[in-house]
Every structure is written in C-alpha cells, then in structure tokens.
Image (cartoon, helix red, strand yellow):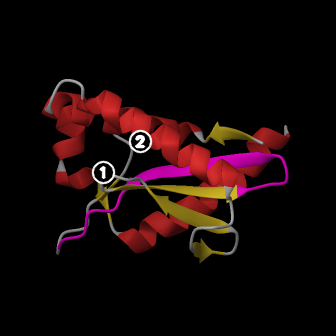
C-alpha cells in the first residue's frame, strides 16, 4: 500500500516542520522521523486508530502534539491533514500556514468542528483528485 498527501496536508506538514525547526535546530528533522514512523504504523495497521467520521481516522504522532487524519482505500492511504492536537481553551488546530508569522496569527486558527468538516471535504476532493 502507498500513501498520498492531499496538497493541503502537505502544506500543513511542511509548516509544522518549519515551526519546529524555528523552535530548535534539528527538531524539525525529529518531527519528520516521527511522522514517518507514524505513517509506517498506519500502513501496517490502517484500521487500528479511532474513527472520526465515516471512514476517516486519526493517529496521534508520538513526541509531538500532532495527529494524522487519514482515510484508506484498498490500495492507497490518503493523508487528509496533519493537525495540531494540543488542547487549551483556545482552539489550536491550525489552517495551513507557510510562514512563522501566519502560524502565529490567531486568524489562522480554526475550531475543531470546522476542521473535521474541512477534512471530510478534503477527503472527497482527494478521491476525485487521485481518481483522475
């Protein structure tokens, strides 16, 4: 089985790498290693993690407050989002952002319910995109 990142999920992933690299040199690399390890676990056991809605699941990344939201087809693992799961009174699930300034801007935050709806929309778009 192979995996495919939705373009928005790829942007989120790169933004998280940049964020951690800005925090401490080498931490972005550690994040990449943990995401890769998580993807390997998902590929080995795609139905092991909790269902969010319909066929969409989330697997938590070790060491970092991020999860991978995904859906599985018979031959493809669709990465729908790489989301921050840190929980406080302020929603912290971030929309894709490409710069540190955008990541730290409160207008780039989205409440979790809206984020789940967006992931479902992305999932359906991914199926159309990959099927083309």
Return the residue nearer the eye: 128 or 6: 6
Q: Is residue 85 magenta?
A: yes
Count the marks: how many? 2
Residue 29 got which mark? none
User: How far across and how far down the image is residue 25, in percent?
Assistant: 18, 24
Q: What residue do we see at 59% from left, 66% from top?
A: 57
The residue that mark 1 highlights is: 63
How many residues crowd mark 2 within 10 Å: few (<14), some (14–19), many (20+)? some
- Reading the image, the residue beneath label 2 is 34
The residue drawn where x is 69% and y is 75% is 54
Q: Is residue 3 left or right of residue 50?
A: right
Give the CA separation, mark 2 to mark 1.
8 Å
Q: Are marks 2 and 1 in contact (CB under 8 Å)?
A: yes
Q: Residue 71 magenta-drawn?
A: no
User: Which quadrant does the C terminus fall into?
Assistant: top right
Q: Secondary structure at mark 2?
A: helix
* Mark nearer the N terminus (2 vs 1): 2
Q: Name which residue lies at 34% across and 68% down.
A: 111
* Image location (x, y in percent) of residue 90: 18, 69
Callout 1 environment at 10 Å: few (<14), some (14 to 19), or many (20+)? few
Q: Position of residue 89 (x, y in %)?
A: 17, 75
Q: Which quadrant would residue 83 be assigned to in this image?
A: bottom left
- Residue 7 at x, y percent in the picture: 56, 37
Write down the region rendered in magenta: 72-88
């Amino acid at each position: 089985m192979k995996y495919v990142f939705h373009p928005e999920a790829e942007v989120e992933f790169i933004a998280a790498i940049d964020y951690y690299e800005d925090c401490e040199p080498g931490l972005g690399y550690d994040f990449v290693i943990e995401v890769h390890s998580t993807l390997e676990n998902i590929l080995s056991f795609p139905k092991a993690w909790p269902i969010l809605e319909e066929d969409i699941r989330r697997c938590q990344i070790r060491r970092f407050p991020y999860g991978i939201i995904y859906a599985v087809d018979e031959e493809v693992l669709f990465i729908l989002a790489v989301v921050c799961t840190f929980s406080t009174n302020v929603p912290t699930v971030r929309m894709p952002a490409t710069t540190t300034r955008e990541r730290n801007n409160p207008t780039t935050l989205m409440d979790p319910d809206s984020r789940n709806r967006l992931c479902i929309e992305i999932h359906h778009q991914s199926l159309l995109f990959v099927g083309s």
